[in-house]
Image: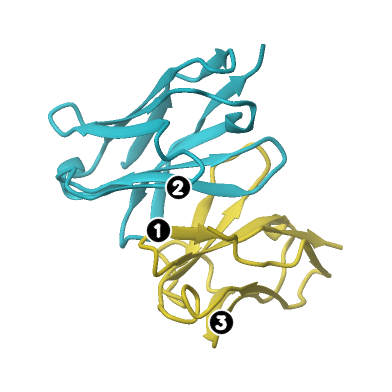
Amino acid sequence: EVQLVESGGGLVQPGGSLRLSCAASGFLFSTYTIDWIRQAPGKGLEWVSSISSGSHDIFYAESVKGRFTISRDNAKNSVYLQMNSLRGDDTAVYYCARDWTGTTFDYWGQGTLVTVSS
Amino acid sequence: QSALTQPASVSGSPGQSITISCTGTSRDVGAYNYVSWYQQHPGKAPKLVIYDVSVRPSGVSDRFSGSKSGNTASLIISGLQPEDESDYYCNSYSSSGTPHFGTGTKVTVL
């Protein structure tokens, strides 16, 4: 069974940092692109970042470019999102998702909530 | 990056068919057959219901179908059922190399 489990969310002050993790199981992790997608409270989905299977292709949304860094460890079946210089508008549930074709997210984690507030 | 445009809400009675539109541009929806649709119930993660414009994943009801014309993609739900009441989001690959989500549509079953 394919599973994606996010962790690392929590309350952080503006300007602070947080590192999210996404642990995968049930599929050949090293062959898939993984994406982070977020959803602010009561709002829609926003794509954040993606990392290809071998980490050669990495993309970011303009809203997080220069502040967030995505990485992965195929030996640990995990993807990470290092979030620095956090702002109030980064408050959201962050989902990791398996990226099947570059724009088809066929499996999602349950999400982890990040709250940026003083 | 601009979000794709969806109606805020669509409603229908049980058994009816409804259509949710997703309007983009010639740089995303109009340029690629890489449109997907997601169903999201409150407090839950999104679930893929259509990909590549009109392909239904295994296990998804055949009451869900998709199509595209020009810069607008559509999700059609036929034989509307109470469990279809949910939020729906479209997504398309874009010429920027990144995906764009739609603004989301709340479907209400009357």
Identify which residue is drawn at 53% across, 17% down.
A15
Colour assignment, chain A: cyan
Q: Are marks 3 and 1 in contact (CB under 8 Å)?
A: no
Residue B36 percent location from the top left of the image: 48, 66
Identify which residue is drawn at 44% across, 59% down.
B99
Q: CA distance from mark 1 to mark 2?
A: 8 Å
Which coloring applies here? Answer: by chain
- Name the chain under label 1: B
* Left or right of residue B53, residue A40 in this image: right
Residue matched to label 3: B71
Colour assignment, chain B: yellow
* Left or right of residue A26, residue B6 in this image: right
Q: Nearer the viewer, residue A59 or A79?
A: A59
Q: Which mark is residue B98?
A: 1
Q: Which mark is residue A93?
A: none
Q: Which mark is residue A61?
A: 2
Going by the numbered disc 2, the residue's amino acid type is Ala
Mark 1: few/some/many CA within 10 Å (<14, 14-19, 20+):
some
Q: Are marks 1 and 2 on the same chain?
A: no
The extreme bottom residue here reads B69
Q: Are marks 1 and 2 in contact (CB under 8 Å)?
A: yes
Foreground tag (3 vs 2): 2
Q: Are marks 3 and 2 on the same chain?
A: no
User: Of label 3 and label 1, which has the lower sequence position?
Assistant: 3
The image quadrant of residue B32 is bottom left
Mark 3: few/some/many CA within 10 Å (<14, 14-19, 20+):
some
